[in-house]
Image (cartoon, rainbow, N blue to C red):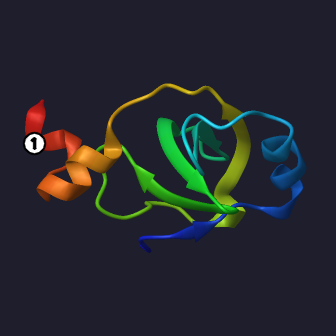
Amino acid sequence: MKSVVEIPCEWLDYLKRHGETGPGYQILAVKLKDGRCFDQVVASEGCIIQIRGYKEVPFTPDEVASIEVNHRYWNFREFERAGKYSWEFH
């Protein structure tokens, strides 16, 4: 697993057509070819940089089946500053 994963090229135009969730980032829903779904994925500058509940991105670009901008906000920067992740609050 990696902490930053590039978004597949075929999705970059789609992301450019949608607004930002906040300055310099978008919140996405990502569905994988194996059926797994992640509905709070932070993307910035063509890369997935964080997923709620994960320290690292648990998939590779070739596993992505679809991406949707959903702006499903959570304060991921606050978790990052505190050194905490969402699973610690469940």
Q: Residue at x 70, y 61 (%)?
A: 7
**How far from the left and from the top, in percent, is residue 45?**
67, 62
Residue 12 in the figure: left or right of residue 6: right
Q: Which quadrant would residue 73 be assigned to in this image?
A: top left
| Above or below for 32 versus 55 | above
Q: Residue at x 60, y 57 (%)?
A: 44
Residue projecting furthest to the bottom? 2
Q: How many marks?
A: 1
Q: Residue at x 59, y 37 (%)?
A: 28
Within-10-Å neighbours for mark 1: few <14, some 14–19, many 20+: few
| Above or below for 49 versus 70 | below
**How far from the left and from the top, in percent, is residue 9?**
84, 63
**How far from the left and from the top, in percent, is residue 48?**
56, 58
Q: Which quadrant would residue 70 be assigned to in this image?
A: top right
**How far from the left and from the top, in percent, is residue 54?**
31, 53
Residue 51 in the figure: left or right of residue 21: left
Foreground pick, 42 / 24: 24
User: Looking at the rendering, in which quadrant would you find the C terminus?
Assistant: top left
Kind of residue sitting beneath label 1: Glu
User: Looking at the rendering, in which quadrant would you find the N terminus?
Assistant: bottom left
Q: Residue at x 78, y 34 (%)?
A: 18
Residue 14 in the figure: left or right of residue 84: right
Residue at mark 1: 88
Residue 7 in the figure: left or right of residue 90: right
Residue projecting furthest to the front? 23
Please tell me whether mark 1 sits on a helix, a strand or a loop.
helix
